[in-house]
Structures are given as structure tokens and as C-alpha cells.
Image: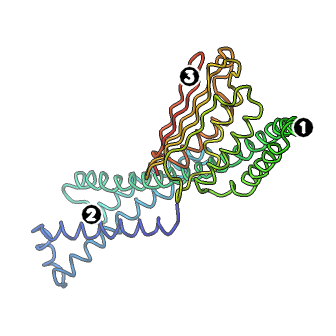
């Protein structure tokens, strides 16, 4: 939280409180009668009287405000608590004596001041605690974002060697039989690497480029599929002038090819995008082997990373549903733009 914001907040709080006192006290007949004993016009007396009230409240407020960090520090907690207790008793008593001296009704007045002044002492502690809580949440969010970036970078390094090894092996096997297709596959591979190295480092990328990257990735993964014709990849709607966080969908798609049971010719992979004006719907489903489903409940480290990224980048603006059974794994993701 910026210091300028905190300072402005404090100033506005006291200005508001000052005029609130002024508005209430000017309606009280007691203040008009009290002003008769002083050689000042009524309005000037009232303004000064409100100023004295504010000054008397500022001291306990900022005593609590500045002692709060010591209350939460193990090394200084006992001393801070002792100072707070002494202040909370001495200050109201001293204020009561200074105001009217030892007169009839001093106990009632002291009790009243004790309640008011210590109320502002607690208020100061509450304000500081709130600001510190907000500050810690902001620091935590920054650290989480940095951690997510590190996990994303780690995910890229995990994806690259595994994906590169399989793709190069498949292209090498394809060269004798279909050199033209092998050449096109190499071009797609270079486009994928360019996107991952250069374009995916920004906070947002064009959805059109992200879909092109996904398309190239799918085409290269098809090279190692026994039944590539069973894979369905479909995009509905226009991706122009829309942006998303980079590599947001690829962990789900990467896991499809990692965990698909490519043994059943009756089962297939489905990858679907529906793009609307303010909504991107993504869904994918794939068959899985029963044993793999039971052993790999997280379904890959990439999915844990993408869940955290969604919470940070699209808080309250996404809906992720992951469902699985013994033979099928399905993901539905809605992004509200």
C-alpha cells in the first residue's frame, strides 16, 4: 500500500471527524451557554473547541497506531502491553483532572473519558492492523505471482526436452516416407519454439497466436498417434482483438497426450474452443487407462500451476471444472473477458 494513500486516508478521516463534531456540537444548547464565558464569537469558539477535542483524540489514536507493530513482536510484546495498559489508565484520569479538577462527578466523567479515549486507542490499533494486513496480502500476492512465473518457466523447461525428443524422433522417421510432411513438421516445430521463447514471456498474448501455437502443437503430437483421425480440434467464433494469458490452455492439452490411452480405437480426443464477445469457453476430453487415473490424481504438475495462475490472473472471472472417471478425463474452462 502506498504511503501517500495512507497519509491521505488519515487526513480525510480527521477532517471528517472534525466537521462531524462541529455539526453535532453546534446543535447542543450547552455549547452556546459555555461560549458566553469566553471573549470569542460563538462560531470561533466552536471551531476551537472542536479542534481541542480532535487533538485530545489524536494522541490515544496514534499511540495505538504506532505501538501496534510492537504488540505483534515477540521481543517487545510484554513492554508494549504494559505501556498500553498504563497509558489507557493514566491518560483518561489526567484528562479528567485537567478539565475540571477534583469536583463532584469526577468518577463518572473519568469513566466517560476512559471509554471514549480508549475507544480511539483501540481504533488506532485496528487501523494499523488493517493496513498491515493489506500490506502483507499485497506482498503475498507479489510472491505468489513470482512463484507462478517460476513454475511457468519450470513447466516450459519440462515440456521442451520431452516434446522435442519425441517430435524430432517422429520427424526423423517420417523423412524417408514423406519428406514434404517432414519439412512442414519442422516448420511447425520452429514456430512453436519461437512462440515459447519470445512471445509467451509477456503478460498477455493475442488469442489468435495462442490458438495457432496450440494448433501446431496438436499437429506435431499427431505424428506419434496410432489413430490421429480420432482427434477433433475445433474453434468456433472469432479470436481477433482478444488477448489471454500465455500458455493457459496448453497444460490441459499437453496432459491429454501424456495420459491418453491410445489403445482403444473407439475412443477419441476432443479439443474445443467457443469464442464469444465476452466469454472464451474451452473444453477437452480424452480416454485414460484405469490404472493411470488412480495413480495420477493430479493429472500433471502443469494443472496445479494453471489453477494458481487462473486464481491470480482471472480472480472471479473464470470457472474451471475437471471431471474424471475410470475411462475418461474432461476439462471445462470458462474465461470471462
CB under 8 Å between discs 3 and 2: no
- Residue annotated with mark 1: 176
Query: Gap between marks 1 and 2, in whole Å?
Result: 106 Å
Q: Is residue 231 left or right of residue 96?
A: right
Secondary structure type for disc 1: loop
Name the residue rendered at 73%, 41% in the picture.
155
Q: Is residue 279 left or right of residue 298?
A: left
Q: Nearer the viewer, residue 188 or 83?
A: 188
Query: Mark 3, mark 1: which one is toward the viewer?
Result: 1
Q: Earlier in the sequence, mark 3 or mark 1?
A: 1
Image mark count: 3
The quadrant in which residue 194 appears is bottom right
Image coordinates for residue 311, horizontal then vertical, percent: 54, 43
Query: Gap between marks 3 and 2, in whole Å?
Result: 78 Å
Image coordinates for residue 266, horizontal then vertical, percent: 62, 19
CB under 8 Å between discs 3 and 1: no
Secondary structure type for disc 2: loop
Q: Residues within 10 Å of mark 2 (few under 14, many from 20)?
A: few
Would you place residue 201 above or below residue 21 in this image? above
- Residue annotated with mark 3: 324
Name the residue rendered at 19%, 84% in the picture.
40
Would you place residue 274 above or below residue 114 in this image? above
Image coordinates for residue 63, horizontal then vertical, percent: 46, 59
Q: Residues within 10 Å of mark 1 (few under 14, many from 20)?
A: few
- Residue annotated with mark 2: 101
Name the residue rendered at 62%, 22% in the picture.
287
Secondary structure type for disc 3: strand
Q: Earlier in the sequence, mark 1 or mark 2?
A: 2
Query: Gap between marks 3 and 1, in whole Å?
Result: 40 Å
Image coordinates for residue 179, horizontal then vertical, percent: 85, 43
Amino acid at each position: 500500500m502506498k504511503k501517500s494513500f495512507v497519509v491521505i486516508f488519515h487526513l480525510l478521516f480527521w477532517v471528517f471527524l472534525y466537521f462531524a463534531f462541529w455539526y453535532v456540537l453546534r446543535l447542543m444548547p450547552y455549547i452556546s451557554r459555555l461560549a458566553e464565558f469566553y471573549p470569542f464569537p460563538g462560531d470561533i469558539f466552536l471551531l476551537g473547541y472542536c479542534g481541542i477535542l480532535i487533538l485530545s483524540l489524536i494522541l490515544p489514536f496514534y499511540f495505538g497506531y504506532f505501538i501496534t507493530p510492537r504488540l505483534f513482536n515477540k521481543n517487545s510484546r510484554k513492554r508494549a502491553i504494559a505501556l498500553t495498559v498504563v497509558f489507557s489508565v493514566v491518560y483518561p484520569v489526567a484528562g479528567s483532572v485537567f478539565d475540571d479538577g477534583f469536583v463532584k462527578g469526577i468518577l463518572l466523567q473519568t469513566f466517560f473519558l476512559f471509554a471514549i479515549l480508549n475507544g480511539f486507542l483501540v481504533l488506532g490499533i485496528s487501523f494499523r492492523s488493517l493496513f498491515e494486513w493489506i500490506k502483507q496480502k499485497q506482498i503475498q500476492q507479489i510472491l505468489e505471482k513470482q512463484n507462478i512465473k517460476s513454475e511457468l518457466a519450470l513447466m516450459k523447461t519440462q515440456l521442451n526436452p520431452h516434446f522435442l525428443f519425441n517430435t524430432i524422433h517422429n520427424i526423423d522417421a517420417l523423412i524417408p516416407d514423406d519428406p514434404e510432411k517432414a519439412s512442414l513438421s519442422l516448420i511447425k516445430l520452429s514456430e512453436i519454439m519461437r512462440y515459447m521463447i519470445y512471445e509467451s514471456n509477456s503478460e498477455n498474448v493475442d488469442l489468435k497466436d495462442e490458438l495457432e501455437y496450440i494448433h501446431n502443437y496438436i499437429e506435431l503430437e499427431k505424428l506419434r498417434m496410432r489413430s490421429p483421425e480420432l482427434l477433433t480440434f475445433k474453434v468456433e467464433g472469432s479470436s481477433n482483438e482478444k488477448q489471454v494469458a500465455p500458455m493457459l490452455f496448453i497444460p490441459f492439452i499437453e496432459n491429454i497426450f501424456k495420459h491418453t490411452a491410445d489403445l482403444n480405437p473407439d475412443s477419441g480426443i476432443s479439443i474445443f474452443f467457443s469464442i464469444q464477445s465476452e466469454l472464451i469457453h474451452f473444453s477437452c476430453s480424452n480416454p485414460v487407462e484405469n490404472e493411470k487415473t488412480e495413480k495420477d490424481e493430479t493429472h500433471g504438475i502443469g494443472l496445479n500451476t494453471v489453477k494458481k495462475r487462473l486464481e491470480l490472473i482471472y480472480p472471479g472471472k473464470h470457472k474451471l471444472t475437471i471431471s474424471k472417471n475410470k475411462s475418461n478425463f474432461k476439462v471445462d474452462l470458462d474465461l470471462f473477458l
